[in-house]
Image: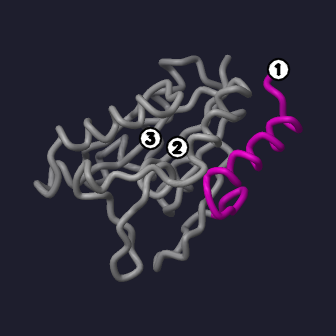
Amino acid sequence: MNRAVFLDRDGVLNRTVVRDGKPYPPEGLADFEILPGVMEACRALHNAGFLLIVATNQPDVVRGIQSREVVEAMHDVLHDLLPLREVKVCYDTDHPESSCYKPSPGMLLEAARDWSIDLSHSYMVGDRWRDVGCGKRAGCYTVFIDYGYEETLRDQPDAVCADLLEAASIILAHAKLNPLQ
């Protein structure tokens, strides 16, 4: 079995655009900026043996606000710069039938099947309540990056931090106490 760190995209790996206290994805490739410390954090987690898998909601594609080509170009940048195993994308909008739109755990469950991942020894890192809820529903340890957005968490994260570099430190320390058997 493998261990994974599931990473939300916007706000975890790249800078978001915050309007009225709510984060939004970058509009285009020119606005797509990797956050400070992300490369170092990903390298440290990868070197510790974690599979790094992005799990991102991108509903703006079906809403007609963003093109799928731009989203995929952003993911190409991530693959070029970071030691990612896979980028999982949910293009659904928020509706009860969706199994992939976070907080539904579908993307994590699918990755667990595809990559033989032990979810009880894996981690979900995100900056929104949906990320924490997804990780909890999948049985992962959850790390919340708190940017002070104007939205309420619906599930209590296992850890709270300021950025991915701090999240990586938390994960590496927790993994030492809970090794994969």
Q: Position of residue 10 (x, y in %)?
A: 41, 54
Residue topped by disc 1: 181
Residue topped by disc 2: 7
Residue topped by disc 3: 55
Q: Nearer the viewer, residue 8 or 1?
A: 8
Q: Specify which label sits upstream in the sequence, 1 or 2.
A: 2
Judged from the image, the secondary structure of the residue bearing numbered disc 2 is strand
Give the residue at x 43% y 37%: 106
Q: Residues within 10 Å of mark 2 (few under 14, many from 20)?
A: many
Q: Specify which label sits upstream in the sequence, 3 or 1.
A: 3
Q: Is residue 28 left or right of residue 102?
A: left
Magenta stretch bounds:
156-181
Give the residue at x 69% y 35%: 44
Residue type at mark 1 is Gln
Residue type at mark 3 is Ala
Q: Residue furthest bottom?
A: 20
Q: Pointers 3 and 2 in contact (CB under 8 A)?
A: yes
Q: Specify which label sits upstream in the sequence, 3 or 2.
A: 2
Identify the image quadrant of residue 122.
top right
In the image, is residue 170 part of the stretch drawn in magenta?
yes
Q: Is residue 21 above or below residue 154?
A: below
Q: Is residue 117 left or right of residue 173?
A: left
Q: What is the spatial separation of the Cα atoms under label 3 and label 2, in whole angstroms?
A: 6 Å
